[in-house]
Amino acid sequence: MPGDWKQKLKPLHLVRIFEELSDEEHPLCAEELCRQLSARDVQAERKSVYHDVEALRQFGLDIVSATAPTRGYFLAERSFELPEVRLLMDAVMAAGFITQKKTRELLKKLEKLVSVHQANRIRQVYIDMRNKQDNEEIYYNIDKINTAIGGRKKIAFCYVRREFGAGGDVREHVISPYAMLWVNDHYYLVGNNQKYNNLMHLRIDRMRAVNVTGERSRHFSEVSEYRDVFDVADYAGKAFNMFGGETVQIQLRCKNYLLDSMTDRFGEDARLRPSGDSHFAVTADALHSEGLIAFIMQFGADVEVIFPKTLRDELAGKAMGLYELYEVKNQR
């Protein structure tokens, strides 16, 4: 009797063996499958393994028979393909809000989505951890924020702003949360401070002691253009460097070489038209903010604001300020 339950677990062990040890370049023959089962204290004969493999195929596993360069079986289809796992690993390593400890934990988990041989091939020899945050609370905070968004409840927390000197500035906030966005390798909360009638962004890695309150959230339709659903993708497309502001329609006249840059930033739906032989005009919706101004100024004289006039005037003021700053210093 003690061995009966182990035999009943044999198909499950086989699934684990195929997941961990097999791939197209490393098929497993019946003898190797028997050896792997024996290492797991499950006895099996080749004939029974053939039947088990066929049963797993009937269940839906894509187990393929290989004949060259060696004979055997391997798991051909997984939940994630090797390039997808590598993409996820790169994203985890690049994300500054994920701590060093959690980065290593997540990478180990992602490696289990492919065979050990594939994991060795994509494993990083060196990971630059210098840009990583040290706030281990972030994972619990994300879960609480997600719960609050789903339950339409406000959250209370302390927010740390960096300042010169020790400690920084720590303030308490009560926010109606609407969405979380990953932008420029930071994770942001988009919500409404109950004191104001607009949207605000806060970096989640700087939030401490997050708690879901029993108070109902203010509906986002009261403080934004969205009515039934908070359109995260649309909002992210309009925000520049996560600065809040009023949604306005803008038109920019750009040098032709900036076509890809403008399409990447404003999306394929941006309205484009030629404007002379060497320029084109792009019309799109954006949040009127310091982030938008900084985006435009990085291109210097190669991008001109056509409208709105208020934005054009602000750019002119910024440019004049820069000129006066450097002109005065050059005269010293």
Image (cartoon, grey):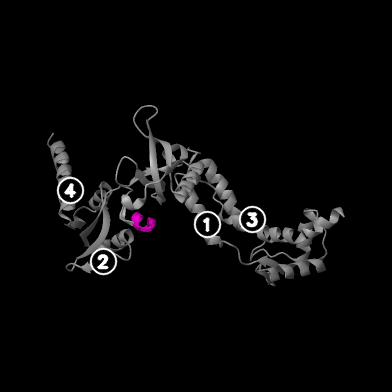
> Real-space Cα distance between discs 4 and 2?
23 Å
Q: Amino acid at mark 3?
A: Val
Would you name the residue on which mark 4 appears? 314
- N-terminal label among 1 and 2: 1
Magenta extent: 227-236
Q: Residues within 10 Å of mark 2 (few under 14, many from 20)?
A: few
Q: Secondary structure at mark 3?
A: helix
- N-terminal label among 2 and 3: 3
Residue 240 rendering spot, x and y as whole percentages: 31, 51
- Can residue 70 be seen in this snapshot? no
Q: For residue 39, which quarter of the picture?
A: bottom right
Is residue 4 part of the magenta span, yes or no? no
Q: Secondary structure at mark 2?
A: strand
- N-terminal label among 4 and 2: 2
Would you name the residue on which mark 1 appears? 86
Query: Is 209 rendered above or below residue 16?
Result: above
Query: Residue placed farthest to the left in the image?
Result: 331
> Real-space Cα distance between discs 1 and 3?
14 Å
**Quarter placement of the N terminus:** bottom right
Depth check, mark 4 against mark 3: the one in front is: 4
Circle number at residue 116: 3
> Real-space Cα distance between discs 1 and 2?
35 Å
> Real-space Cα distance between discs 4 and 1?
44 Å
